[in-house]
Image: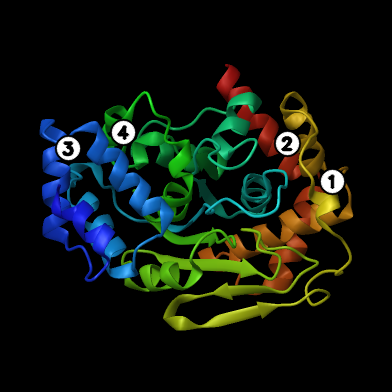
Amino acid sequence: MHDALTGLLERQAPVGRETWRSWWDQLGDGSLDRAEAVALLAALSSLLPDHRTLSHLVDSLAERRTANTVPARWEGTVNIVGTGGGPRTFNISTASAFVAAATGVKVVKSGSRAYTSQLGSVDLLERFGVRLTSSHAQTEDTLATYGIAFAGPFVYPAQLTRLARTVAPLSMKPFGRFLNALGPFLADLPVTAQVTGVSANAPLDTLRELAAATTGRRIWLTSNTSGADELLPFVTNTVHCEDSRTLIIRPGELTPGEGSFEDLRPAAEPAAAVDHFLSVLSGTAGAVATRTVCLGAAALAVAAGTHPDWRSAFSLAEEAVESGAAYDLARAAQAVARA
């Protein structure tokens, strides 16, 4: 049994970077068998390890990237990505990304297919017809043209793909808890800031420690009393900022506090998801849906440093919906993909 798996099972000390290096080496040369790979994923998913083990794991993957694949920092750009889980809603973060971009915020959206929900961001974008970028250069060009880009799987370590192939035909879906929780820390994007919603299914304290140890970008984690991985206008939200600072956003402070999850339910059928998503961006899905995506957009604007004040950022987001700018931007992205 490999030391990485032994360490995860015993949980007596952090699994170090050298151990993870050895794990990836053996995965790469084919000397790890399928049963051991499945066991490691199961151990990571059953109980996420401490932040030191996760930090070593993330670092061991980051160092395997070739230096020439990492571009210069995209100043003033923010990535939005959540941990998934929590109450079922429409794709709030994807809608917030379009709204924020329509106000002038440079936004990259990373994400994945659904592990625990009906449709993940990638599933929705595929149905919508928006093309994911395939390189850093293409992402940068798309940002320059539209102010928003949706990053493809190239941003994630190739070792995860090798791991998925090793455990096949078993799906990676049973290990969604681990993949959702750690995924936001694995995306290789040279953004200035990152806003990550943390659901009740993810270990917030561990992820806060991991965020504090992450260099190169400012990471904000958001949580709320409902357990959702989004900022919501009708519950009390906490924004866990850098340097252990926190910001509390209560119902009625930035936006009216009425509403419930009934106002944020996803389309009844996946086939109707695109039409419902467009209704959210056009402001016709209801006031609560509009406030919710605008609150998320405001967080992106403040985190990126584009708009320093939450109230003005929220007002600009509302204007982007009311004027049709957010809807038009989404339609433009769709048209480019179809050209």
Q: Residue at x 66, y 80 (%)?
A: 248
Dot in front, 2 or 4: 4
| Residue at mark 1 | 283
Quadrant for residue 38, please give it: top left
Which numbered marker is on residue 27?
3
Q: Which mark is residue 161?
A: 4
Inspect the image, locate mark 1, and give the three-letter code of the amino acid beneath it: Gly
Q: CA distance from mark 3 to mark 1?
A: 48 Å
- Gap between marks 2 and 1 measured at Cα: 12 Å
State the SS at label 2. Answer: helix
The 10 Å Cα crowd at callout 4, few under 14, some 14 to 19, many 20 or more, is few
| Residue 81 in the figure: left or right of residue 256 | left
Q: Residue at x 23, y 68 (%)?
A: 14
Residue at disc 1, secondary structure: loop
Q: Position of residue 45 (x, y in %)?
A: 41, 51
**Residue sitting at x 59%, y 63%:** 200
Q: Amino acid at mark 3?
A: Leu
Q: Are marks 1 and 4 in contact (CB under 8 Å)?
A: no
The answer to whether residue 159 is seen in the rendering is no
> How would you rate the neighbour count of disc 2 (Cα within 10 Å): few for under 14, some for 14-19, many for 20 or more?
some
Disc nearest the viewer among 3 and 4 = 3
Gap between marks 3 and 4 measured at Cα:
11 Å
Label located before the other in sequence (2 or 1): 1
Q: Which residue is mark 2?
A: 328
Does residue 269 sit above or below 72 in this rendering? above
Whole-percent x, y for residue 254 in the image: 78, 73
- Please, is residue 86 above or below residue 305 in the view? above
Between marks 2 and 1 in the image, the one whose residue lies nearer the viewer: 1
User: Earlier along the polypeptide chain: callout 3 or callout 4?
Assistant: 3
Q: Amino acid at mark 2?
A: Asp
